[in-house]
Image (cartoon, helix red, strand yellow):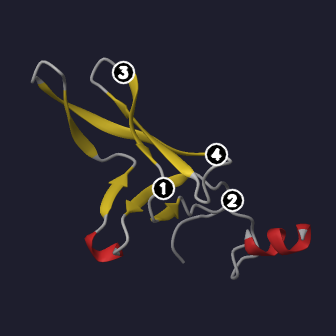
Amino acid sequence: MAMLLSILMMDPYSKKKMSSNIIRKISIGPDYMKSMNYSVGQKVIRKWDNGVESFHEIVHIKEVEKPETSDTPEYLIFIENSDEEYYEWKKVQNMPVVVEYVTDFEGDEGSK
């Protein structure tokens, strides 16, 4: 099993391991073409209880351990405001999800 995971984490051309499995983008919904998409770096509007809207940026998407009562993992989406304050903005649970990861490779010198 460890050998299989090692092979799956390799770049097939350079045989270098990927640097991480950090989530870059999440698409939520049963139909990928009509799904809601959230990407790290994306600007979003947060509407407060008093009706005021402010602009924020998605800074992190995190997969959390799936609860014992669910067959699917949960995801948290965090945003940052202009004062560099972080908020948990959305929690995705019990929904079909497509996850895209950062695909930087160790020792990657750019396109060849």
Q: Secondary structure at mark 1?
A: loop
Marks 2 and 3, Cα distance to the nearest angstrom? 29 Å
Query: Which mark is drawn over residue 94?
Result: 1
Q: Which corner quadrant of the image does residue 5 belong to?
A: bottom right
Task: Please tell me which of labels 1 and 2 falls first in the chain.
Answer: 1
Q: Tell me which amino acid carries mark 2.
A: Glu
Query: Which mark is drawn over residue 27?
Result: none
Q: Tell me which amino acid carries mark 3.
A: Glu
Point out the image quarter for the N terminus: bottom right
Q: Which residue is mark 4?
A: 67
Q: Which residue is mark 2?
A: 106
Q: Position of residue 101 (x, y in %)?
A: 54, 60
Marks 1 and 2, Cα distance to the nearest angstrom? 34 Å
Task: Please tell me which of labels 2 and 3 falls first in the chain.
Answer: 3
For the residues bearing labels 1 and 2, Cβ distance under 8 angstroms: no
Answer with left or right where residue 84 lies relative to residue 108: left
